[in-house]
Image (cartoon, rainbow, N blue to C red):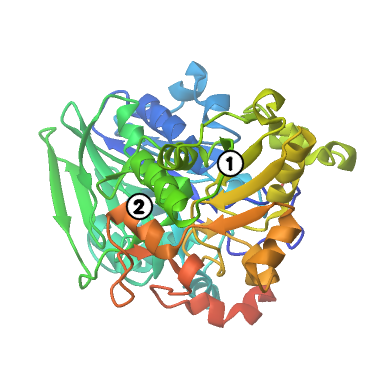
Amino acid sequence: MTDIFRDETPLMSLDDDTLHEECGVFGILGHPDAATLTALGLHALQHRGQEAAGIVSYDGTKFCSERRMGLVGDHYTNPVTLAQLPGDRAIGHVRYSTTGDAALRNVQPLFAELEIGGIAIAHNGNFTNGLTMRRKLIADGAICQSNSDTEVVLHLIARSRSASSSDRFVDAIRQMEGGYAMLALTRTKLIAARDPIGIRPLVMGDLDGKPIFASESCALDIIGAKFVRDIENGEVVVCEIQSDGTISIEAFKPQAPKPERICLFEYVYFARPDSIVGGRNVYTARKNMGINLAKEAPLEADVVVPVPDGGTPAAIGFAQASGIPFELGIIRNHYVGRTFIEPTQSIRAFGVKLKHSANRAVIEGKRVVLVDDSIVRGTTSVKIVQMIRDAGAREVHIRVASPMIYHPDFYGIDTPDADKLLANQHATLASMCKYIGADSLEFLSIDGLYRAVSGAPRDPQAPLFTDHYFTGDYPTRLVDRDGISNVRQFSLLANNG
């Protein structure tokens, strides 16, 4: 899910130089502890979004909704809150930490009462024609209450003339383009859908015979559920509680099949290391990235230091392949929140030191290899290199376990404009290295990354993954990008919660 309209003046945070995943989804049908299990699942998916969380449940009579700003643990560990979510079916959502409109109206799941009954929906990803569809709906008289492209799907479901809720859902997603993993909850059904090329991940699990869907397998592990399978690209799965209490499960593909191309950044950065994405263990893939990086960009050094936490598995692989000792030369403070770092410029001036501190004992006098998962703007890299030098490092070399990022994303990753990306601000690698202040700088090749994840180099004629941020090869039409000059013709009431 993304906001169609965003504030032009971003909030300054320590995370401004990282990529942000849009969100994560979780749903369960037929279990008496549905809301509690959903809260636990969302807790496991917290890395996919830290701005807000929401849960909608149904108790056989009414839908109940709790949507809150903040972390899952801030609200959904409270028994009073969970008591407001009765029923044996629920879906939930965690929203990423945006630089744009942070308002309760955008917190999912979104709910609407329709002719066919109530329906709640939540989705991870981004529709590349969401703005275009929204403009058409508003021109036709629709009233939009949020600035989320997810709301477009609700309107399309409402306008469908199909008889059943699942058919209306299919009618709606057929009109949408882009990358998404979506869940819908009706009075009797839990519906899951994944975009036609499978950009965003979605898995199916089972707990005591009850179906579960989640963005990642780690959300199944936390509640002791069994992993069943990945939802296939372009697949819709409809789970329905029958009158006798049994649950029917129907899976189908309403659109013409296409080759799957899951987002490569799920392996580089977004997914939790213990998750299985597309049948591949994320930790193993990241460790392989480090191994391949050591082969492609060898050097003489004394210590390999990860930039936590994303660079840690790759740094382990780099150290093992190179024979250079691995050390935790940077210690991360996991308890720095946005509310602490935003209020004043004097606090923000501490920069990266609020979040990372150098472990002088393993750095001083050493030739240090810093291994990071990716570099976006490079501003954080500048500060980290200086921090390592201040701790007494003799040399500082950067090795990045993914290729240079040249292109923005339109499928659910919050990326800067192309001209703000470090790779586009420097004509040469040497210039980039000088800007960062390192003694050397190398990136993993695109073939090295593909080999780390799939075991084979990239086939330009049939890439296995969505990798446009590295290659410029966008896998779908970018409908909204072509009409971007018209974005500002709509405005929204300021909302404080």
Q: Position of residue 15 (x, y in %)?
A: 66, 45
Nearest to viewer (mark 1 / mark 2): 1
Q: Which quadrant: the C terminus?
A: top right
Give the label on residue 301, or none.
1
Report the Cα–Cα distance between label 1 and label 2: 23 Å
Q: Which is nearer the eye, 249 or 25?
A: 25
* Amino acid marked by disc 2: Ala
* Vertical order, 224 against 484 (above or below): above
Mark 2 neighbour class, 10 Å CA radius: few under 14, some 14 to 19, many 20 or more: many
Helix, strand or loop at disc 1?
loop
Q: Report the side of 88 relative to 14 (left or right).
A: left
* Amino acid marked by disc 1: Ala
Q: CB atoms at circles 1 and 2 under 8 Å apart? A: no
* Vertical order, 425 against 90 (above or below): below
Q: Which is nearer the eye, 432 or 1?
A: 432
Locate residue 351: give its quadrant: top right
Residue displayed at 64% across by 80% down: 486
Q: Position of residue 298 (x, y in %)?
A: 50, 51
Q: Which is nearer the eye, 374 or 497?
A: 374
Q: Is residue 170 visible?
A: yes
Q: Which is nearer the eye, 417 or 93?
A: 417
Residue displayed at 44% across by 46% down: 290
* Vertical order, 315 against 382 (above or below): above
Name the residue beneath numbered marker 2.
452
Locate residue 430: give its quadrant: bottom right
